[in-house]
Image (spheres, grey):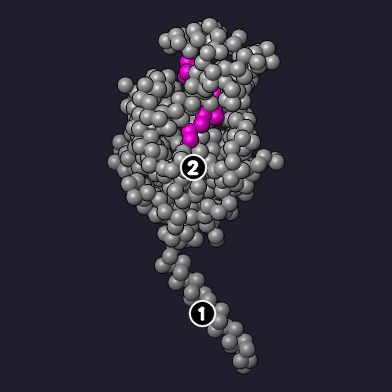
């Protein structure tokens, strides 16, 4: 006969097996149970809350990945910025445009100067930000910002390449502190209407480069803003060198890598000049936000070293403090009439989220015990051993999106 201890052990094992069958039968897989617990519908007007956003304790740089010129990325940006500003102490919005061009947007959201906003929007035509919803976004941010105390106002800063030299030049003109010391050459540059991009580039380069030659004049003109002008001029120096060394001006790995390295240097500059506790929100094309290399058609090949990865490697000050938030943008399929993610997410198995495709939904993937922090078989087919949180830590599902109208 079996001993009492053995019988007790058998009963305990049987009970455990029953519990496992009950939970697996009623609650589904580990992934399904996790999503049922943490995936929350969001209302853009009501915004996010801490419970929905989930883990945020160790993050300082919140990096959202969009698909450009889609309608739903704009309410998402408003919602995300407001939540991060009010709940996580984010006061700096970093933009996927040059530091010079970014001065125009920051000037507008601090002052409401519509003439500057119109100039900035005119310069965006033909670029990845060519969407009339840009106007609404910045007008909303101006109104929101005007309600904040001085020490809590949001500042917008461009950190990317200068996509429009005329915007850069106009931005630099806003930094002038001593108008009476501005030379004839600078006045002509600032006062002339927008013209050919190449001509504008040819005019501004000799006025800034080499910096050593112009330092005294630049210090006289720009005063305390001199270091910002130097940082903007650094882009011109880098770009001239990049082209002279055979760099391609065509979209692809080489140009993306140049841009992301330049963005990294601008972030380094900000970390050295802004308060030590400064926190940031940036919304770039999704490819820039991944923290591990991805071979996906939307950004080129596996050689494209993304900004998200650069921020998190080596001894960079933000290592371990970057939260990448993937915007999974969807539109209605012409066949099924259901929301389906656009083709930019084919590099991982997004079907596990399909129960949430019909409603704007926020999913923190980085909560304690999350299955997404470990390898899930078939989730990332091309990368053995990879977890989804190696690439991004949150998902915001954005259904019913459409291509946005161009700037008028």
Q: Magenta span covers which residues?
A: 155-170
Residue placed at 48% from the left, 55% from the top? Answer: 54
Residue toward you, 373 or 8: 373
Q: Which residue is mark 2?
A: 151
Q: How far is disc 1 from disc 2 in space, using C-alphas?
A: 59 Å
Left of 233 or right of it: where is 85?
left
The spot of residue 356 in percent (x, y) is 38, 50
**Callout 2: SS:** helix
Category of crowding for the residue at label 1, using alpha-carbon neighbours closer than 10 angstroms: few (below 14), some (14–19), many (at least 20): few
Q: Considering only vertical position in the picture, is 205 above or below 155?
A: above
Q: Which residue is mark 1?
A: 15
Residue placed at 43% from the left, 43% from the top? Answer: 149
Residue placed at 62% from the left, 87% from the top? Answer: 6
The spot of residue 189 in percent (x, y) is 50, 10
The spot of residue 19 in percent (x, y) is 48, 74
Of labels 1 and 2, the one closer to you: 2
Residue placed at 38% from the left, 42% from the top? Answer: 147
Residue toward you, 135 or 239: 135
The spot of residue 265 in percent (x, y) is 63, 30
Give yes or no for residue 162 being in the magenta stretch: yes
Number of marks in the rendered image: 2
Picture quarter containing residue 263? top right
The quarter in which the C terminus is drawn is: top left
Category of crowding for the residue at label 2, using alpha-carbon neighbours closer than 10 angstroms: few (below 14), some (14–19), many (at least 20): few
The quarter in which the N terminus is drawn is: bottom right
Residue toward you, 361 or 278: 278
């Amino acid at each position: 006969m079996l001993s009492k201890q053995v019988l007790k052990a058998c009963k305990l094992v049987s009970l455990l097996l029953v519990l496992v069958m009950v939970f697996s039968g009623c609650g589904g897989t580990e992934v399904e149970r996790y999503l049922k617990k943490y995936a929350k519908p969001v209302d853009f007007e009501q915004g996010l809350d801490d419970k929905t956003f989930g883990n945020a304790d160790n993050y300082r740089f919140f990096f959202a990945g969009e698909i450009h010129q889609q309608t739903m990325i704009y309410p998402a940006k408003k919602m995300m910025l407001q939540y991060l500003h009010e709940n996580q102490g984010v006061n700096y919005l970093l933009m996927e445009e040059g530091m010079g061009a970014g001065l125009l947007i920051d000037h507008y959201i601090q002052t409401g100067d519509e003439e500057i906003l119109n100039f900035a929007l005119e310069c965006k035509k033909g670029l990845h930000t060519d969407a009339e919803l840009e106007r609404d976004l910045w007008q909303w941010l101006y109104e929101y910002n005007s309600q904040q105390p001085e020490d809590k106002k949001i500042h917008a800063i461009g950190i990317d390449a200068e996509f429009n030299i005329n915007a850069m030049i106009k931005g630099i003109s806003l930094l002038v502190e001593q108008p009476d010391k501005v030379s004839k050459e600078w006045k002509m540059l600032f006062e002339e209407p927008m013209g050919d991009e190449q001509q504008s580039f040819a005019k501004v380069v000799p006025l800034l480069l080499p910096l050593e030659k112009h330092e005294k004049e630049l210090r006289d003109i720009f005063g305390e803003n001199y270091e910002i002008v130097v940082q903007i001029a650094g882009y011109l120096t880098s770009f001239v060198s990049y082209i002279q060394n055979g760099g391609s001006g065509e979209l692809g790995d080489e140009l993306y890598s140049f841009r992301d390295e330049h963005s990294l240097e601008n972030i380094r500059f900000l970390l050295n000049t802004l308060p030590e506790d400064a926190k940031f929100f940036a919304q770039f094309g999704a490819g820039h936000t991944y923290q591990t290399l991805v071979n996906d058609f939307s950004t080129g090949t596996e050689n494209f070293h993304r900004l998200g990865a650069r921020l998190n490697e080596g001894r960079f000050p933000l290592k371990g403090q970057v939260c990448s938030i993937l915007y999974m943008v969807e539109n209605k399929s012409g066949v099924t009439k259901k929301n389906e993610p656009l083709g930019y997410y084919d590099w991982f198995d997004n079907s596990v989220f399909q129960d949430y495709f019909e409603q704007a939904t926020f999913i923190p993937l980085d909560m304690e015990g999350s299955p997404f922090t470990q390898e899930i078989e078939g989730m990332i087919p091309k990368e053995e051993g990879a977890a989804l949180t190696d690439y991004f830590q949150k998902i915001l599902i954005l259904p019913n999106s459409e291509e946005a109208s161009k700037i008028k």
